[in-house]
Image (tube, helix red, strand yellow):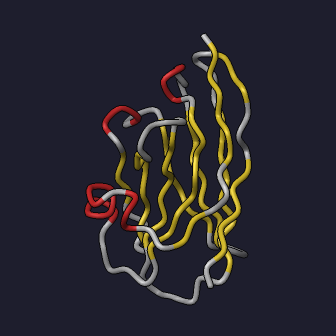
């Protein structure tokens, strides 16, 4: 069973930065994708960024150039989402999610969307004030 635990959510002002972390345990599969998905209350979940097991990445157009997803496998698997130049419209609950096993590329997984994922974290709140 893959287990995901997010941390790093906070309240910041417009233009600020945050780094979210997702600690991944139980990943026994060689091929997978891990993504960050955000949701505003009352709206559908939206895929923000994805990284696949080969390290390729893909981003939602509105965060391209501001957000960076990365993966650290040195000791355990941790997936980060570096968020820069934050805007009020980035305010949401951010979830870490995994599709495993999966041979999808990051590009494919972002376009398939949140329905692609079979494991989810509990979410962390990001609030950006103007």
* Residue at (57% x, 89% y) in the render: 28
Question: Residue 31: where, in percent of width, then height?
Answer: 42, 82
Question: Residue 110: where, in percent of width, then height?
Answer: 33, 56
Q: Is residue 129 above or below residue 100?
A: above
Quarter of the figure with residue 6: bottom right
Quarter of the figure with residue 88: top right
Q: Is residue 15 above or below residue 120?
A: above
Q: Is residue 55 left or right of residue 96?
A: left
Count of numbered circles on the image: 0
The C terminus: image quadrant? top right
Q: Is residue 26 above or below residue 22?
A: below
Identity of the residue furthest to the top in this view: 130
Q: Is residue 95 left or right of residue 31?
A: right
Question: Residue 78: where, in percent of width, then height?
Answer: 65, 65
Question: Residue 10: where, in percent of width, then height?
Answer: 73, 33
Question: Foreground: 34 or 84?
Answer: 34
Question: Foreground: 102 or 66?
Answer: 102
* Residue at (42% x, 57% y) in the render: 50
Q: Is residue 32 left or right of residue 22?
A: left
């Amino acid at each position: 069973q893959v287990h995901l635990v997010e941390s790093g959510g906070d309240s910041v002002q417009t233009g600020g930065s945050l780094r979210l972390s997702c600690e991944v345990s139980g990943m026994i599969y060689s091929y997978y994708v891990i993504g960050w998905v955000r949701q505003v209350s009352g709206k559908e979940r939206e895929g923000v960024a994805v990284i696949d097991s080969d390290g390729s990445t893909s981003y939602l157009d509105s965060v391209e150039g501001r957000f960076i997803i990365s993966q650290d496998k040195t000791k355990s698997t941790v997936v980060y989402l570096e968020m820069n130049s934050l805007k009020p419209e980035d305010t949401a609950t951010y979830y870490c999610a995994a599709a495993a096993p999966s041979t999808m590329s990051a590009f494919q997984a972002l376009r398939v969307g949140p329905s692609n994922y079979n494991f989810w974290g509990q979410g962390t709140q990001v609030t950006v004030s103007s």
